[in-house]
Amino acid sequence: MRIRSSLATLALVMGALSAGCTAEVKDEGSLPDVEVKGGDAPNVDVDPAQVNVGSDTNTVVTPDINVTPAEGNKQ
């Protein structure tokens, strides 16, 4: 819990510094003590969707482009 509090304080300070303002912490504050016990992850039955992947051949018509270099750019 202390690490999380320190990281939150550091993030606030870095945010204030990057915004170009100043901040003075008068009261550090504290997070509540939390105790977590037991518990189970939910049991979920998932039926994935059927996905069919294949290939297809298509003809794409592209325009003809003729490029003529300028007189000074010929090699």
Image (cartoon, rainbow, N blue to C red):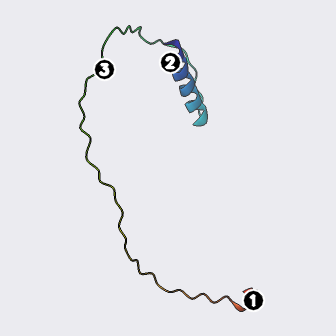
Going by the numbered disc 2, the residue's amino acid type is: Arg
Classify 10 Å Cα crowding around label 1: few (below 14), some (14-19), many (20 and above): few
Query: Height in image: 49 above or below 65?
Result: above
- Residue that mark 2 sits on: 4
Question: On the rendered structure, is 5 left or right of 51?
Answer: right
Q: CA distance from mark 1 to mark 2?
A: 66 Å
Residue shown at 46% from the left, 84% from the top: 63
Query: Height in image: 60 above or below 27?
Result: below
- Residue that mark 1 sits on: 72
Residue 38, given in percent of the width and then of the height, sits at 33, 9
Question: On the rendered structure, is 64 left or right of 33?
Answer: right
Residue 55, given in percent of the width and then of the height, sits at 36, 63
| Mark in front: 3 vs 1 | 3
Query: Height in image: 3 above or below 61?
Result: above
Res. 56 mark? none
Q: Which quarter of the rendering shows the C terminus?
A: bottom right
At mark 2, the secondary structure is helix
Q: CA distance from mark 3 to mark 1?
A: 73 Å
Going by the numbered disc 3, the residue's amino acid type is: Ala
Going from the N terminus, do you reach mark 1 or mark 2 first? 2
Residue 28, given in percent of the width and then of the height, sits at 53, 14
| Mark in front: 2 vs 3 | 3
